[in-house]
Image (cartoon, grey):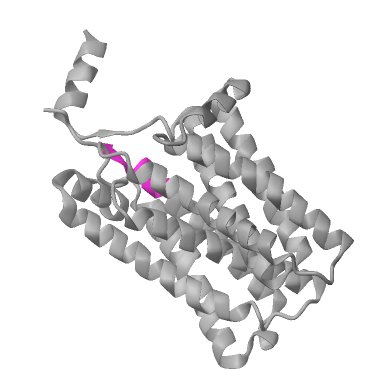
Amino acid sequence: MGSALMRYEWMTKPTPQAEWIEGGGKFIWLALFFTETGAGLYFVSLFFKDPLGMLLGWLVCLLLGGGCFMVHMGHPFRAFRAVLKPQTSWISRGVISLSAFGLFGSLYLVLCYLQPSRDFLVLKVIMGSLCILVAIYAGMLMSYVRAIPLWNTGLLPISYVVSGLWSGSEILLGIRLLTGAPLEQIEPWIHVLLPSFALILVLYLVSITSASSVGWMSVKRIVAGDLSMHFYLGSVLIGLIFPVTVVLYSFYAGITEVSPALLITAIFCGLIGDLTVRYCILKGGLYSPVI
């Protein structure tokens, strides 16, 4: 009787999605964060030809991101079947992109180690394209889920790419801070990507509220419901306001004048904010009722 009632409520009431955020579904949340952050770090490091950043991005994307995907699947060897339908399935395209990222990314790293003076332009362009494909994959996959209005928008893939590049820029800044490398080159990336992410996030939430009543209910959960504490504390206060304050201070005083401890704290806060935003988007998704 209870299960029949639950099925009926799913057909007649907006129902929270749980497959990608509850229980073992949390591995999907972590996998999306790690793959896009790793791809973003590799892309930014590729631009500056920073081998340490590229190596760390490769490891984060494949070992942490890919590992979380495998744990969620339960039967890792079945994952290889996903490559069979790239013409219709974004899951297939994601597996292929991630595999190509691993192959060509390791090849580029080896070549840069053996011949550091060469640029390998063709392979560099291929890797840059693969980084963007990996970063945009989750957003494209989720945007095709028409039953969840919170995800069914073209702004979601854009926001995921920008957040991946922003997180990657922050991590590369931290790497250069710890290794004593120059910081001035990477600073403009953060000055552009951080406000861009904040703007896209606002536009994304506003556009969803006007798309449908269920979309409005999802956004209400995030900004005024059970997810509001996560959103305002983790995403807004820790993840945006504090890093923006540090960025404004560095812009005024010069990044070399900012305390390394303050920069490292701002980097961690930015990553926490990115992770929290993704959690709210996954957790806040509501299925539109069938009837």
Q: Which residues are magenta?
A: 279-286
Q: Position of residue 237 (x, y in %)?
A: 44, 66
Q: Position of residue 116 (x, y in %)?
A: 84, 67
Q: Residue at x 58, y 59 (%)?
A: 40
62 falls in the magenta region: no
State the residue lying farthest toward the left: 291
Number of marks in the rendered image: 0
Residue 3 position (above or below residue 39): above
State the residue lying farthest toward the front: 122
State the residue lying farthest toward the bottom: 253
Q: Residue at x 65, y 59 (%)?
A: 42
Is there any visible trace of residue 246 in the rendered image?
Answer: no
Q: Residue at x 54, y 63 (%)?
A: 165
In the depicted view, which residue is nearer to us: 201 or 234? 201
The prevailing secondary structure element of the residues shown in magenta is: helix
From the viewer's perspective, is 222 left or right of 242?
left
Quadrant of the image for the C terminus? Answer: top left
Quadrant of the image for the N terminus? Answer: top left
In the depicted view, which residue is nearer to us: 236 or 78? 78
**To which quarter of the image does residue 118 belong?**
bottom right
Residue 92 position (above or below residue 185): above
State the residue lying farthest toward the top: 1
Q: Position of residue 244 (x, y in %)?
A: 49, 75
Q: Position of residue 5 (x, y in %)?
A: 19, 15
From the viewer's perspective, is 106 left or right of 127?
right
Q: Residue at x 35, y 48 (%)?
A: 227
Is there any visible trace of residue 169 in the rendered image?
Answer: yes
From the viewer's perspective, is 282 left or right of 69?
left
Residue 177 position (above or below residue 4): below
